[in-house]
Image (cartoon, rainbow, N blue to C red):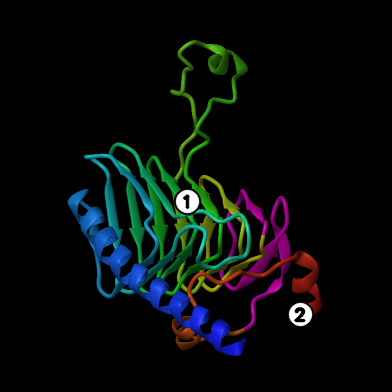
Amino acid sequence: MNWLRYSLRAIKIVRRGTWAVLTTHYTRLWFRANGATVGKPFLSNGVPELELSISGSLTIGQDLQMQNGLHYNMIGRQQKCYFVIGKGAAVTIGDHVGLSGTAIVCHERVSIGNHVQIGMNCVIYDTDFHDLDYRKRALLPEDYSGAVIKPVTIGNDVFIGAHSTILKGVTIGDKAIIGAGSVVAKSIPAGEIWAGNPARYIGPAPATTTATAETSLPGFTGIHSARALNEAR
């Protein structure tokens, strides 16, 4: 029955390839119709969600590669990419960036550098969404005026493992590595490995080159645990 397995495999490859071409063209048109600036080349496996305010902005550099939905980068907790950009807010994504089921919610500014890889199911928030004062949260309608908003900056050649959360006000330095499942609530210096909840310093990142980042697969799984990082030192 090998012939059947090979036939099914060939059908799957052709179907996914055709779908990638269609969704890439559709996504590019949809983004541009909403006022986004999209560089070339551009790849979108599956269709992401975009909520872009008329006064907001989304700027994408060259060679963005996105993995969206159930059938791409299948490592569990599958979702499409989400871009939610509020009034006057700005999201900037550099060149050669890979996003895999990534959600970006921006109320002021989120900046992602060049050669950045962000694993499946990561979220990036530049806002607390709600006030810390329980009395304001209890109001009907809720008072959101005191919710803290601070920009997020991710440097060049950064590697963020799957299922990580990047919170408001964080700056991640160039060539830093974030272990999978981390919650990053404070800034991380360049060239360091951090992991955990809350994220803590693990050790120095291995020396890498831009060429290495360029040839890595998009939508990677990411570093899986702080223990793995310690063992790798």
Examine the rendered structure and indicate whether residue 89 appears above or below residue 74. Answer: above
As drawn, which residue projects farthest toward the top?
140
Residue 103's disc is: 1
Q: Quadrant of residue 53?
A: top left
Q: Amino acid at mark 1?
A: Ala
Q: Is residue 134 magenta?
A: no
In x, y percent, where is residue 147?
A: 49, 29
Q: Earlier in the sequence, mark 2 or mark 1?
A: 1
Quadrant housing residue 1 = bottom right
191 or 33: which is nearer to us? Answer: 33
Q: At x 32% / y 63%, what residue is drawn?
A: 23
User: Percent x, y for residue 222?
Assistant: 62, 69
In the shown orientation, is residue 146 left or right of residue 47? right
**Label 1 CA crowd tier, 10 Å (few <14, some 14–19, many 20+):** many
Mark 2 crowd level (few <14, some 14–19, many ≥20, 10 Å Cα):
few
User: Can the viewer see residue 233 in this picture?
Assistant: no
Q: How many marks?
A: 2
Picture layout, residue 210 above or below residue 57: below
At mark 1, the secondary structure is strand
Which secondary structure, mark 2?
Answer: helix
Q: Which region is colored magenta?
A: 181-206
Residue, disc 2: 232
Rendered image quadrant of residue 76: bottom right
